[in-house]
Image: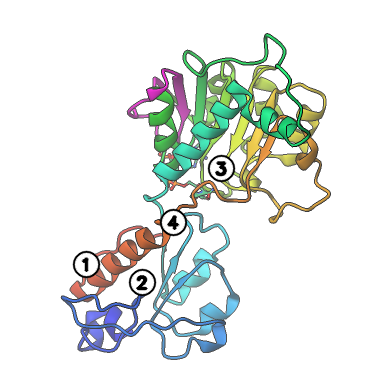
Amino acid sequence: RDALDPAHGDSAGDGDSAGDGESTGDEGSSEVRVVGSSAELEGCDALVTFAYEEAFLSAGLSWIHSVQAGVDRFPFDELEERDVRLTNSTGIHGDAVGETVLGYMTSFARRLHRYRDRGRDGEWKHPEWDEPFTLSGESLCVVGLGTLGRGIAARADACAMDVVGVRRTPTPVDHVGEVYTPEEIERAVADARFVAVATPLTEETRGLIGADELAAMPDDAYLLNVSRGGVVDEAALLAELERDRLAGAALDVFETEPLPEDSPFWELDDVIVTPHAAATTRDYYRRIADIVRENRRRAVAGEPFVNRVV
Ligand code: NDP
């Protein structure tokens, strides 16, 4: 706690920071401990974690950093009551998720996923003449125009796609031709060949893409979800896909993860399932360490945190 709050005495000594175990240099060294369970948190000031456990609340921590950008599993009110700061990892996933979504769209347009599937049976088969298309000139609606959404929009624009988007504040965003509010979402998706979902999961966004929004999409449209499973009504999506009312979907996130083995999503030809890996890159951990180091520096200097959620 001393390292995190200058009001608690000499800040440059024995506090914790996270990262790769090296000294942070300019503000003194930090002991970094790798813990296997919340029982081992005694004496820790700060925690960098993927999971959330209730025991974190009573562990005497003053700062928790979420390895993920999504913090929907953390209890904001209870953290605030206990004076525990929460930061997240937003701001670092735009490139990786942008490339993943571009990959989904390219695969659907150029039919790569189908060739790969058929190749497993040694089947050399041309697609129907009207199946393949090019991304150039096709339309994309990006729902959520933060780090992820902007990473997606920039790449789609570079492929000469027509990009529109949805965000709460309908002010202009680079690479996005028109920005709609959440109330206008059905209009925003009405002409889209692809709809990419990239909002956080909140009370407002749970079920944001439901039966009405899916019905508003054209028959030849693809839904791409890289946000959280709960943002899309999975049952409604499955119903639309099973009766060919939509062309397909690429899904990185689900209500239940890992996706159960008996999920019908595995079986559909024009559904690409990725295992919550849209943002994964070998540099992920380095980028998170950069955020944590910066916030440790700010804690010592008494400056406001970056990426603060609570
Ligand atoms: P940001 O906070 O940078 O952006 C969130 C965007 O969502 C903003 O544009 C915001 O609008 C918009 N938004 C919020 N509420 C609504 C709403 N009700 N209707 C429409 N738009 C809304 O977050 P990130 O881009 O970093 O991440 C977004 C989410 O993606 C994360 O919370 C996480 O759950 C998920 N994620 C998934 C990953 C994966 O591996 N699949 C990796 C990283 C993140 P405004 O601009 O007006 O504020």
Question: Dot 1 lies on which element?
Answer: loop
At label 1, the amino acid type is Glu
The residue shown at (64%, 47%) is 229
Q: Which residue is mark 3?
A: 226
Q: Residues within 10 Å of mark 3 (few under 14, many from 20)?
A: many
Q: Which residue is mark 2?
A: 19
What is the distance, in whole Å, between disc 3 and disc 4 at their CAs? 19 Å
Residue indicated by mark 4: 282
At label 4, the amino acid type is Arg
User: Assess mark 3: CB under 8 A from ligand 1?
Assistant: yes
Label 2 vs label 4, nearer the camera:
4
Q: Quadrant of residue 274?
A: top right
Is residue 168 shown in magenta?
Answer: yes
**Marks 3, 4: nearer the viewer:** 4
Residue 241 visible in the picture = yes
Q: Residues within 10 Å of mark 1 (few under 14, many from 20)?
A: few
* Front residue of 24 and 125: 125
Q: Which mark is first along the chain, 4 or 2?
A: 2
How far apart marks 3 and 2 lie (CA) works out to 26 Å
Horizontal and vertical percent position of residue 255 = 69, 50
Position of 265 with respect to 160 (left or right) is right
